Image (spheres, rainbow, N blue to C red):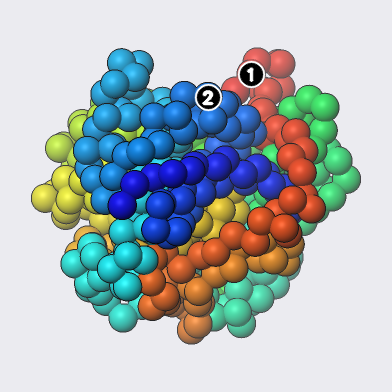
Amino acid sequence: MKIVAADVIVSSPDRNFVTLKITTDDGVTGLGDGTLNGRELSVVSYLRDHVVPLLIGRDPHRIEDTWQFLYRSAYWRRGPVTMAAIAAVDVALWDIKAKAAGMPLYQLLGGASRTGIMAYGHASGRDLPELFDSIRTHLALGYRSIRVQTSVPGINAVYGVAAQPNADGRRYDYEPAQRTPLPAEEDWDTRAYLRHLPGVFEAVRNEFGPELPLLHDGHHRMTPIQAARLGKALEPYDLFWLEDCTPAENQEALRLVRQHTTTPLAIGEVFNTVWDYQTLIREQLIDYVRSAVTHTGGITAMRKLLDFAAQYQIKSGIHGPTDISPVGMAAALHLDLAIHNFGIQEYMPHGRLTNEVFRQSFTFADGYLHPGDQPGIGVELDEQAAARFPYVAAYLPFNRLKDGTVHDW
């Protein structure tokens, strides 16, 4: 079997997606997700101009060899653009291998380690009544674990609050990238946030009881000591995790957070390789690995990262917002089902138009996801439907403090 074609398909149903389709001389095709939110065309160029010419004529079954070739031969390693491009190739090759074997991908990864994949949903509100309504809606949809995000008095726009309007006038919902000429500017006040949030979780616990697993995303906005303060303040409310409490590129910063709180920590959605995690995992400074298959080199790299984490009793919490395409989501689910140290899976349903373009076999029922038993990863691309939705430039927002300083978003 040889690769005879590799096509990069850009489509914007609901939002922009970058999909790689690899075709073999036997007519078997595989799909990979190369979407990088707000910087999609950089991966398109990397794939079309630099990677696709290297794939033609290669044996698609040599997945590890291809991964190492693409990672090492470029000399300039790592980074989100490179790793998203490698991920697209890697997942497409696993899709081909599983289709050729006549099996769902998880069977090639060792078979199922569980019957279903626990998912969490995103509840949010501008005030407590709206937040409570959102939590009840998610519970009615079947979610058994809930991420809680809320507006903060004195701050005009806060990440993750669905009901607040975007700069382009639409609801924020699950897609913060906005189709505006320039990135939208949001404001931030850490002290106001730290004062407000513990009371929100106290109210949620009083309303919904002690059993419901609750999560929260700090979205990189705090310094280490601020993160430590928040983690300690939230301990009475028994969070499942506090996510991205501080920018973790400085891995040693998490030592200070760990010294002051027992709230479980999840880190890594902006990480791209195992190297970003070495100190965090070896010193057990986090509890959950948050990388996405799409941004971390694909199934091959994520399996190695999670095997490393398993040695330290650290679990998976794979990134799964709607800027991960159904292809990337399906790849994550096959990995979730197979690995032993699964923790939880982020799940945000895609929109109607996206589901027209990407035909999916994975399911969500009673709070659990399953990738399905279709050979491969279980996603097919309707190229005619994809062609109806051309690329539209979109930017993620950015933050400024009250004095005008650009801050972490």
- 205 or 21, which lies in front? 21
Whether residue 388 is visible to the viewer of this picture, yes or no, is: yes
Please indicate whether residue 394 sits to the left or right of residue 21 in the image. right
Tally the numbered discs: 2
Q: Secondary structure at mark 2?
A: helix
| Residue ID for mark 1 | 406
For the residues labelled 1 and 2, the Cα–Cα distance comes to 34 Å
Give the x, y percent position of residue 27: 45, 59
Q: Residues within 10 Å of mark 2 (few under 14, many from 20)?
A: few
Q: Amino acid at mark 1?
A: Val
Give the x, y percent position of residue 273: 31, 34
Please indicate whether residue 9 sits to the left or right of residue 202 in the image. right
From the viewer's perspective, is residue 194 above or below residue 360?
above
| Residue ID for mark 2 | 49
| Outermost residue, right side | 169
Q: Residue at x 38, y 71 (%)?
A: 375
Q: Which numbered disc, 1 or 2, marks the residue that appears first in the sequence? A: 2
- 28 or 97, which lies in front? 28
Q: Amino acid at mark 2?
A: Asp
Give the x, y percent position of residue 385: 73, 59
Question: Which image quadrant: the C terminus?
Answer: top right
Give the x, y percent position of residue 370: 41, 75
- 326 or 344, which lies in front? 326
Whether residue 297 is visible to the viewer of this picture, yes or no, is: no
Quadrant in the picture for residue 337: bottom left
Q: Residue at x 65, y 42 (%)?
A: 10
From the viewer's perspective, is residue 126 above or below residue 336?
above
Quadrant in the picture for residue 152: top right
Please indicate whether residue 66 sits to the left or right of residue 218 in the image. left
